[in-house]
Amino acid sequence: MYKIYINGNCLLIADHSSVLSGANDHIKTVPFLGNHKSLLNYIDKLEKSQEQLSIALLTPDPAQLFMMAKSLYKSIKA
């Protein structure tokens, strides 16, 4: 499971919903079908949200989805 925080909101990437057991009810769980454009929509939603929001994307290959998300940003070393 991967967690990416965007403006205080959490994007979870997991392979199945059982990983999220015990999590609070404020997590919106969505199956991810591999569409690059839909990933951008979920990230945009987290960036623009005025309230606390968490989205869990379920995918058979979480590592690949994490790399896709990581490729959208430029790494800046502190």
Image: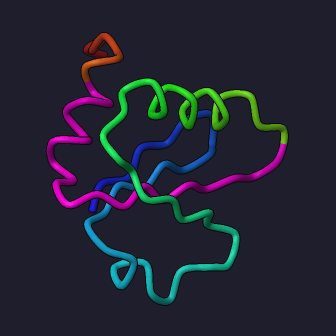
Residue under the point 54% across and 80% down: 23
Note whether 34 is above or below 71 in the view shown: below
Above or below, comparing residue 2 to residue 69 in the picture? below
Q: Residue at x 39, y 50 (%)?
A: 32
Q: Which of 29 and 12 is in front in this view?
A: 29
Left or right relative to 1: residue 61: left
Magenta range? 51-70
* Residue 11 % position (x, y): 48, 48
Q: Is residue 77 left or right of residue 58?
A: left
Q: In which quarter of the image is the C terminus?
A: top left
Q: Is residue 67 magenta?
A: yes
Q: Residue furthest bottom?
A: 22
Residue 8's x, y, as percent?
63, 43
- The N terminus sits in image quarter: bottom left
The picture quadrant where one finds residue 45 is top right
Q: How many labels does the image show?
A: 0
Residue 30, horizontal then vertical, whole percent: 51, 59
Residue at screen point 82% across, 47% down: 51
Which residue does the image show at 54% across and 32% down from the upper left?
43
Give the colour scheme shown.
rainbow
Note whether 37 is above or below 10 in the view shown: above
Pick whichever, 18 or 33, lies toward us. Answer: 33
Q: In this view, does 72 lie above or below 26?
A: above
